[in-house]
Amino acid sequence: MSLEDETKTSAGEKVQLESISAPRLQPPSMSESNIESYFLSLEFWFAASGISASAQYDARKFNIVMAQVPPNKLLELRAIIDGVPANDKYTYIKKKLIEHFADSQQKRLQRVLSDMPLGDMKPSQLFNEMRRVAGSSLGDAVLLDLWASRLPPHAQAAVIASRGDAADKTTIADAIVESMSLRNINSVALQVPQTAARAPEKPPQPSIEALQREIAQLSSKLEKALSTRDGFRGRSRSRSRSKTTFSRRDKTPADEICWYHRVYGDAARRCRTPCRFNKAAPSSGNNQ
């Protein structure tokens, strides 16, 4: 075997080995809401898969794109599909799909101006998303001003004071926001034990048995107080009754003395029965 044949054989084996060892990558999935990113990723996939930009791969690239279109969108794209040219099919379908699915320029600017807050994204992620949506409609200077206005106040001041480019400003903003987030987490972690230590302890709740004992004691005291009051009233009534009886016994009731003796007393010369004057008073020896 000549040297030339050996060289050709070695080159063929090398190409075969490279084709065998090359990984098979799945094509990126089409995203209707981010169609431009899909085609950007697809270009890298073509290069990794050995699909060049030559005319012989044009139909294959077109079919790969159309296989990624959701089936429910094929009828919607029927007019675009019917207008596919004989040559440059991939370039045609790429342009038409971007025009069909991408937002209009006015919607893009509206999203960048008012509908893209920082939220839970990093500042660099927000800037890259704003740049993607804005496309070529806004320059970096205007885009940086809009982006900085959505940052926290402490990060805004640092970004405005920085004289670097967009990459430097986003790096500074990421570092500041991340440090502030860690500081907030640490302060909350330190405040939790202090708050728990300062929390007043709840007084112990009395048991049911203790409540029952207190109620029984109060009931006993109330019964004693009532019985003492009733006994005092009974003694006072008996005393008043005994006094009345004693007075009635000591004194002769006026109803048992006749009118003459009540008026004239011992000088009365007439008496009407029944009259107890002579029985109650000492006898004077005079006949009435």
Image (spheres, rainbow, N blue to C red):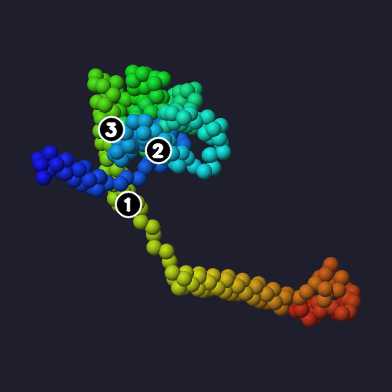
The N terminus - image quarter:
top left
The amino acid type, in three-letter code, at marker 3 is Asp
Cα distance between the residues tagged 3 and 2? 42 Å
Q: Which mark is residue 60?
A: 2
Q: Position of residue 31 (x, y in %)?
A: 44, 38
Closer mark to the observer between disc 3 and disc 2: 2
Q: Earlier in the sequence, mark 3 or mark 1?
A: 3
Mark closer to the chain start, 3 or 2: 2
Q: Which amino acid type is shown beneath numbered disc 1?
A: Ala
194 vs 160, nearest the viewer: 160
What residue is disc 1 on?
196
SS category of the residue bearing label 1 = helix
In screen coordinates, is 62 left or right of 267?
A: left
Circle number at residue 174: 3
Q: Write the residue at 53% across / 72% down.
A: 219
Residue 53 percent coordinates (x, y): 34, 31
- Which secondary structure, mark 2? helix
CA gap, disc 2 and disc 1: 67 Å
Q: Disc 3 vs disc 1: Cβ atoms closer than 8 Å?
A: no
Quadrant in which residue 186 is drawn: top left
Horizontally, residue 242 falls left or right of residue 79, namely right
Q: Nearer the viewer, mark 2 or mark 1?
A: 2
- Looking at the image, is mark 2 or mark 1 earlier in the sequence? 2
